[in-house]
Amino acid sequence: MKSLRTPWIYSPKFDLAAIIGPPVMVTLVVLIFGHQMANIQQPTWLWILLVLGIDVAHVYSSLFRTYLDSEEFAKRRTVYLLVPALCWLVGVGLYLWAGPGAFWTCVAYFAIYHFVRQQYGFFMLYRRGEPTGGFEYRLDQITIYLTTLYPLLYWHTYPRAFQWFSDFEVIRIPWTWPEVSVRFVYLGCLAWFFWKEFRKPQFNVGKVSLLAATAAAWATGIILFNGDLTFTLINIVSHGIPYMALVWIYQYRKIEKVGVERNRFLKFFQWRYVPIYLGALFLLAFLEEGVWDWFVWKEHASVFGATHVQLSAVALAWLVPLLTMPQLTHYVLDGFIWRVNKKSGREVRAVID
């Protein structure tokens, strides 16, 4: 009988429900109902749930890991103060110099990079304790990257009926041979990865499940189905829910280690306050999207009212980067707060610092 070994982020129940479960469940929903989804427009209630409740909300969950945590903020005060300002000013410069199209292209590709890196980070959480050098380590790295990069390559090669952002289109690859070549490499790495994992005397459920869930979600959302709703559903759910869960459980685990006496902010991270946590994130998301709708998009009058303000191109050049600043700050700071620490042999500081 093969023994099990998984360095869970918190516990099997929590991880399977909040980290690995969301991409699995949403992929199953799309596989079952995807063809029906292709024929319907996204209803307003689902837009509220996906965009406000998960997509934009998960960006603001970073606040509870950084700015609202006085101890964490004190550690990196300069970084936390400079990054938002730089994101805004660089955005303004790009918008004015290169135009809205180039601005949104850069934002979109930064978002894509962030999504790819999140799956890599979660994967490394589940393989911590294993050797960080040698062939198997490199195979693990290559395979988890290919679970996201190969579908992205497919998207850049063949026309798709969805977009990552409004006013954004991926850069087209005019040849099919890169996709075909990488496809065989990807399938070979997948087969090799699962073969080596199932041959080990101890089976790492978390690592294998996370990679399989990532591969299934990205392939289903981008390759198997070619619809805006199916892509949006998988993209948002499989990325946003695990991130919000990771932020919350990180602070919850600190209660077990240091108690609430040293850091009263941690009192908020108790199970009975989860609805307040989610409600606060939704409120912040609602406020941001309301400003977007009033001044820029003007698409959801039924949600935010018919208050629409027409701004000049110069005003938009300052406002649009300001509204994307929380999102870009979230992407940048992600590289600091969940950084891998290879020198000490501690894989990811997220759960063990």
Image: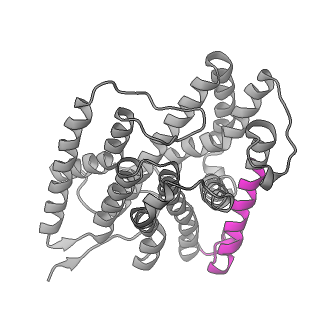
* Residue sitting at x 77%, y 22%: 313
> Start and end of the magenta stretch?
259-288
Task: Report the magenta stretch's main SS.
Answer: helix
- Where residue 308 sits, quadrant-wise, is top right
Q: Is residue 195 left or right of residue 92?
A: left
Q: Assess whether residue 292 is covered by the magenta stretch.
A: no
* Residue sitting at x 63%, y 61%: 46
Q: Is residue 186 above or below residue 250?
A: above
Give the percent coordinates (x, y) of residue 310. 84, 31
Q: Nearer the viewer, residue 228 or 249?
A: 228
* Residue sitting at x 40%, y 58%: 122
Give the percent coordinates (x, y) of residue 51. 63, 54
Task: Specify the farthest residue to the front.
Answer: 39
Q: Nearer the viewer, residue 168 or 126?
A: 168
The answer, for residue 133, to whether it is visible in the render is no
* Residue sitting at x 40%, y 47%: 222
